[in-house]
């Protein structure tokens, strides 16, 4: 009640994740680095129940989805406009990357913000990337004080301290999580950003 009625609020924090080994792995394997990042973010999110906490409908107590899928943005390089799409991530990492490439190709001919029939399901996690900017802080203004789902934004990676750092902004509703929960998710994600031939299926 405190953070949904008395003082509804969200908080955001930005950290630098080490992605050098994963970036090199993706390059050598010919995989989209963005797609690999999305897949592993969803793996980490599905391992944390507070990352799956959301409304099914207003007026009914919120709950925890059994699993969530990624909702991410794709850029049309000609029009410089974005499409918001989603894609199941329940198979292997390689199959997800393949499905990602096919979806990206189909979206380029659509030119609409929501190109998929039915729009974006509720059981998704919003993920976006700003690959032109290496930021140290990032915040999304949400007019709905009871928007409980997390929001993730990534920036441009850069060489730093002998590694490759990726700015990673995480926004959470305080009714769902606090700093401890954010640290649990981020630690899990950093572990999953270690390279591997194939991460298999999501949790």
Image (spheres, grey):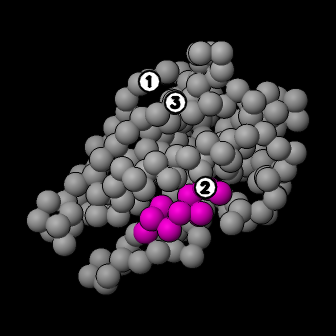
Residue 183 within the segment the image draws in magenta: no
Select label 3 or label 1 by which is in front: 3
Residue 144 in view here: no
Viewed as shown, does residue 186 lie left or right of 29? left
Q: Secondary structure at mark 3?
A: strand
Q: Which residue is mark 3?
A: 16
> Label 3 crowding class (10 Å Cα cut-off): few <14, some 14-19, many 20+?
some
Marked residue nearer the N-terminal end (3 or 1): 3
User: SS for tag 2?
Assistant: helix
Is residue 106 positioned above or below 148 on the image?
above
Q: Tell me, yes or no, whether the highlighted magenta stretch contains residue 45.
A: yes
Disc 1: which residue = 135
Range covered by the magenta-colored residues? 42-53
What is the chief secondary structure element of the magenta stretch?
helix
Which residue is pictured at 52% across the width and 46% down the height?
A: 186
Image coords of residue 29 (percent x, y): 88, 35
As rendered, which of 109 and 35 lies closer to the eye? 35
| Residue 203 in sight from this viewpoint | yes
Give the distance between the C-alpha atoms of the residues marked 1 and 2, in whole angstroms.
Answer: 23 Å
Look at 43% across and 50% down and name the residue there. Answer: 182
- Residue 138 at what x, y percent from top left? 37, 33
The CA span between labels 3 and 2 is 16 Å
- The relative height of residue 191 versus residue 87 in the rendered view (above or below) is above
- Residue hosting label 2: 44
Res 36 → quadrant: top right
Name the quarter where the N terminus is drawn: bottom left
In the rendered image, residue 74, in percent from the top left (x then y), is placed at 60, 41
């Amino acid at each position: 009640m405190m953070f949904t009625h008395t003082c509804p609020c969200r908080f955001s924090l930005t950290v630098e994740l080490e992605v050098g080994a994963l970036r090199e792995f993706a390059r050598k394997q010919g995989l989209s680095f963005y797609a690999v990042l999305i897949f592993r973010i969803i793996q980490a999110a599905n391992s944390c129940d507070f990352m799956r906490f959301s409304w099914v409908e207003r007026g009914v107590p919120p709950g925890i989805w059994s699993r969530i899928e990624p909702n991410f943005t794709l850029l049309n390089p000609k029009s410089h406009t974005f499409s918001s799409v989603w894609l199941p991530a329940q198979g292997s990492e390689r199959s997800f990357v393949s499905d990602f490439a096919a979806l990206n190709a189909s979206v380029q001919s659509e030119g609409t913000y929501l190109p998929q029939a039915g729009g974006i399901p509720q059981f998704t996690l919003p993920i976006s990337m700003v690959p032109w900017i290496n930021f140290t802080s990032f915040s999304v203004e949400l007019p709905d004080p009871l928007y409980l789902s997390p929001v993730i934004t990534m920036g441009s990676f850069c060489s730093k301290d002998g590694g490759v750092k990726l700015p990673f902004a995480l926004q959470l509703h305080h009714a769902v999580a606090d700093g401890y929960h954010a640290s649990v998710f981020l630690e899990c994600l950093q572990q999953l950003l270690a390279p591997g031939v194939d991460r298999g299926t999501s949790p």
